[in-house]
């Protein structure tokens, strides 16, 4: 019989206790791809609520020029 491989579910980093702030661009860079787009939650493993929080913080950091809009 064929054995099925079950992929490990990704855990939301913010639910485990890590905080994201717009003043820390180094932590926000892990949620942005090389073109400058926000990485979707199916790739990062965040829950829907915290993905919206991350997107809001990235947009704040872009507005005050801590993060670039494009690479």
Image (cartoon, grey):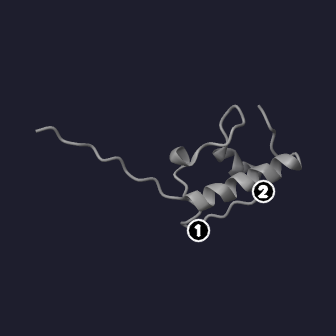
Q: Residue at horizontal 78%, vertical 56%?
A: 22
Give the position of the N terminus as an image quadrant.
top left
Instruction: Work out whether 32 lies above or below 27.
Output: above
Q: Residue at horizontal 62%, vertical 42%?
A: 39
Horizontal arrangement in the rendering, residue 60 relative to residue 14 (left or right) = right
Q: Which residue is mark 2?
A: 22
Residue 17's disc is: 1
What secondary structure is marked by label 2?
Answer: loop
Q: Residue at horizontal 55%, vertical 55%?
A: 46
Quadrant of residue 70 within the rendered picture? top right
Q: Residue at horizontal 56%, vertical 49%?
A: 41
Residue 48 x, y percent position in the rendering: 57, 57
Instruction: Work out whether 14 lies above or below 29.
Output: below
Residue 69 x, y percent position in the rendering: 80, 38
Q: Residue furthest right?
A: 64
Q: Which of 1/27 is in front? A: 1
Quadrant of residue 35 within the rendered picture? top right
Horizontal arrangement in the rendering, residue 6 relative to residue 62 (left or right) = left
Q: Which of 7/49 is in front? A: 49
| Distance from the alpha carbon under mark 2 to that under mark 1 | 17 Å
Label 2 or label 1, whichever comes before in sequence order: 1
């Amino acid at each position: 019989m064929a054995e099925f491989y079950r992929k490990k579910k990704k855990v939301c980093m913010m639910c485990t206790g890590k905080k994201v702030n717009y003043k820390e661009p180094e932590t926000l860079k892990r949620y942005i791809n090389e073109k400058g787009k926000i990485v979707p939650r199916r790739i990062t493993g965040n829950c829907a609520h915290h993905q919206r929080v991350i997107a809001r913080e990235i947009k704040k950091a872009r507005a005050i020029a801590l993060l670039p809009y494009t690479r």
